[in-house]
Amino acid sequence: MVTTTFHALKEWAVAVTALEAGKTIMLLRKGGIHERNGRFQVVHDEILLYPTYEHQQPFLLKPEYANLVYPVTPGWHPETIRIGSWAKITDIFPVCDQLIVNALLPFHIWNEHFISDRLKWKAPQPLYILLLRTYNLSQVREIPYLPEYGGCKSWIHLDETINLQGAEPALSDSTYRQLVAEIRNIVGDKFYAPCV
């Protein structure tokens, strides 16, 4: 396990908060506009969670999460970014089957509209289901925003290294294992089927 890192995954702030609180272990990704080959790829599996605000849309979230989002103008970002957690990506499932994705609805923060929208966008490409074991840092860091952190990309390198020692898991080992088992049971081996 790493003890320091500067690798970060950008994700909606509301999702980062849910991961840190142990409300979810799941992210859904298709990839940003500036991803290599236009596809989402996991570049690092132990990453800091970098909260973003610009693209958060309340109408794509379940009601209990929609109320936590305040829309911002395009290009807006805070002057400092709160880095409060890191995560180990333990599982990656590329899924194309709408029924499987619908069955996973209880495990994440998004609503049916988001799922349908994500599956239709770049339809030949799968929707990537990421399972994250999240750890809350012993000391939250506030780092200055830099222009290179902006843009529609999933992965960034922070300008400074963050110490991960002393971080506490958002969920117990047994709870995390149970959730992963339930999700794997839903996904089964069907996720290997190619998208049409």
Image (cartoon, rainbow, N blue to C red):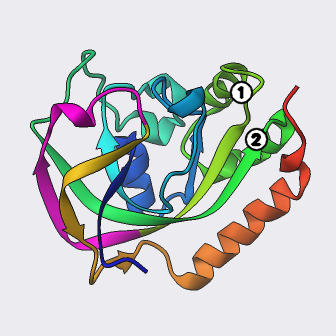
Q: Is residue 163 above or below residue 158?
A: below
The one nearer the camera, 16 or 165, is 165
Mark 1 and 2 residues: CB-CB less than 8 Å, in contact? yes
Q: Residue at x 80, y 36 (%)?
A: 96
Task: Name the kind of residue labelled 2 in the image.
Answer: Val
Q: Name the residue under label 1.
A: 119
Q: Where, quadrant-wise, is the C terminus in this rendering?
A: top right
**Secondary structure category for the residue under label 2:** helix
Q: In this view, does 137 lie above or below 118?
A: below
Q: How many labels does the image show?
A: 2
- In the rendered image, residue 72 lying in the magenta stretch gets the answer no
In the drawing, does residue 1 fall left or right of residue 80?
A: right
Q: In which quarter of the image is residue 178?
A: bottom right
Task: Name the kind of residue labelled 1 in the image.
Answer: Leu
- The image position of residue 5, as x and y in percent, is 30, 66
Q: Mark 2 points at which residue?
A: 101
Boundaries of the magenta span: 135-153
What's the distance in space between the residues labelled 1 and 2, CA to CA?
9 Å
Q: Which residue is drawn at 49% across and 75% down?
A: 171
